[in-house]
Structure formats: structure tokens, C-alpha cells
Image (cartoon, grey):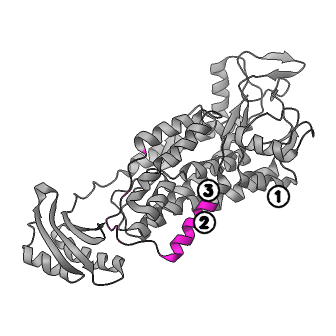
Amino acid sequence: MAFPETNLLNAMVARVFRVDDFTLGDPQQGFLARYRGRLLSEDSAASYDTLSKSLSHYSIIPLFREENDQQVIILVPAPAEPKPARVSINIVLFILTLLSVLFAGVLYSYQGPLPEDPLEQVKTLILNLWQGWPFAVSLLGILLAHEFGHYFMGRHHNTNVSLPYFIPFPGTFLGTMGAFINMKERPRNKRILMDIGIAGPLAGLIVAIPVLILGISLSRADTLTNTRHQHAEGQAFICQSPTLVADMYTCPDDNLLEGNSILYLGLKYLVKGQILPSPPSANGSPLLYWIRFFFTGSPLPLGGNDLMLHPVAMAGWAGILVTFLNLIPAGQLDGGHVLYAIFGRHARKYLWFILLPMILLGAIWNGWWLWAALIFFLGRAQAEPLDQITTLDPGRKKLAVLMLIIFVLVFTPVPFVIF
């Protein structure tokens, strides 16, 4: 479609904007026209919607900006319509993830006999895959709630978003690397970006917290040892080079101790009436021990009490961890969307305030170094809204404070320890 005459563009802009300065461009320069001045209405979001609707007939979109204490409207050619999504890809990835998570779940649930041959072990577990359903249903329920929170909020704001893409990760203790949705167009303003960003973590937590409470109630508190795999019971995973001690297999470097957040510690205390894990000795200050253990994951409380996680509890704990990781305020993560909604383009200035703590925490749990590298190279990309003038309203500012509180509650300095 041919672009309209300049006079017509000027007239449409003048309906919402007092023009002090005007610059004509062309598509090769990346813009059609630039206007400096001031919006006629205090309701910048409504002004944007009005102008956007009138320009949509000509395949033009407006960008609202602030430059040197002036409001600016830039008219640019509308990008090409995204190709229709192939839903079959989403379905196939979900089925593969379901199978992968079921296999992870059966490792926690299966207690039947296992042959010595590793291939026969895998075959036996696959034949009993259905036993992994408590873990799979719980974890996928949390992930589905999280991603569809983003999806439905995007649809609510008429923002083109894809259905969730699940990522299978077979052979790992969760069986998946999570899921994501693709925003096929930029959100109109920071309020919409904020809504889409927080909808996922809130929806995920609404499911994860009851799942975790149920899982904790199904779990038992027992002595924490590194002899989890009992010879007599034929546990689902047997280390390849076991040391036989009485009727127990010891598997060094094959036991996982989950990390703690304030929320996780609180729910364990609420359900079980004690802080778990507890150290084997009461020597020294319990408060100092817990502060050290919370931030370093050491010393391991071997011989003390810990929660022997039911598969449902493992899924609930994983849901809390996923929420924490997504709320890291950087790049395309949910926390990055919230940060940009609050600070706009100034959000990039805070990148090193995020990276430095990760680098320091990496001395305790080296997985943070990988996260810091990913954020350094990929975390600078932001989902910049079309309208940069509209700021957050008071209600959304309160939601931003709520997300900060949630981030503190789910903060897990040491996600897990292998021993």
C-alpha cells in the first residue's frame, strides 16, 4: 500500500499532538516522519491507540519517545505480518517433553527390581514409564500455568504471542529445560510489557505453592546420608561403581540436595513443624549455621534430618526454582521485562548490578558463571515497547513491589548440591 501524503500524516498526528518541529524522512532512512512537541492529552496510552488505529490503514506504526525533555512521535513502516505458527511444532515438543519428564519421574518413583545391564535397566524403566506420572503431572502443570499466564495476558492485550514451546531435556533430573513463548510483535507500552512479564510467574506460583505443600506433606523427614540407593529395595538408579556397605550402595557425587529459598524453608516449617534440613549437631548458633548454609550450601548436614522428597515435592520445588530464575532482572527473562517496564531504556545501566552478584555467587555454585555469561551476551536485548512515553500507573507500581518481594522469597543462592 502506498504511503499517504505528508499533509494527511500531519493532520492525523495533529489530532493528538502539538507539533513544534517536523522532519520528513523516507523508508530508506528507517522512518517516514519525526515530530517533536507535546501530547494534547495526559492519557498518552489512549493517544497512542488513537493515532495507531488511524495509521494502521496505511501500514504505518507510530513510535512514542522522549528525547531531551521533549516528546517525540516517529512514524515508521509497519513490519511484515508474522507467518502463521505451525501448532504441530508446539504439540510435538510438548509430547517429547512429556515423555522426557515421565522418564525423570519414574527414576524417583520406581522401586521394582532392576537388571544389571544398563540397557535392560533403561528398557525396564521405559516399560514402567506410567509410574512417573505424579512428578510429570505436577511439574508440567506448573510450567503450563506459567507459560499460559504469559499467553493469555498477551492475548488479553491484543499482542501477538505464540503458544508455549516446551524444551525436552532427557536424562536430567527434571527432564526438561522449561518452556517459552515468542512475542511476535512489540508490546504497545510499558504497562502491557509489565502485565505480560508478571503474569507467568504469578500463574506458575499459584499452582506451584499448593503442589509443593502437597508434596511436602507426602514426604518424610529422615536422616540425610549419601547411601540413598539400597541394595535390598533395588532402587531405580544404581550407580555404576557402588561400594557395598552392609545392604546399602553408596554413590558419591550422585546424590542431589535441593537448594533452599525463604519460601521453601517456610513451607517446610509450616507443614512439618521444623526447619529442614537440620544439622546433626546442635553445637554453635543455629541462626549462624542457617545463614551460612542458606548462602553456601555447606557444610552438608549429613547425619542430620532432611526431607526425603516425594516426586510431587520435587516438582513443586522445581517450580519455585524456575520462578526464581525467570525473575532475574535481565534481558528477555520475566524479571527483565519488569525492570524495563520500570526504568525504560535506563534498565541497561543496571546490567552489572546483576552480573557482579552472579559472578561472586559463582565461587560457591559455579552454575552462576554460566548464567552470568548467558546474560552478558544475550541479556542486553530488551522487548522495547512502541510507546515509551506511557509510564506505569500506581496499581502496576504496587505489582512491581510485589514482584520484588516474591523475588526475595524465592531467591535460591545455591540451587542444588551434588554430593
At numbered mark 1, what does the secondary structure look like: helix, strand or loop? helix
In the drawing, what numbered circle is on residue 270?
A: 1
At numbered mark 3, what does the secondary structure look like: helix, strand or loop? helix
Residue drawn 44% across and 41% down? 376
Which quarter of the figure has residue 238? top right
The foreground one among 199 and 338 is 338
The foreground one among 102 and 346 is 346
* Residue 118, x across and y down, in percent: 65, 19
Q: In which quarter of the image is the N terminus?
A: bottom left
Magenta range: 379-405
Q: Is residue 50 left or right of residue 140?
A: left
In the drawing, what numbered circle is on residue 402?
A: 2
Whether residue 181 appears in this view of the structure is: no
Q: Which of marks 2 and 1 is nearer the N terminus?
A: 1
Distance (Cα) linking label 2 and label 1: 22 Å
Examine the rendered structure and indicate whether residue 120 appears above or below residue 18. above
Residue drawn 68% across and 50% down? 316
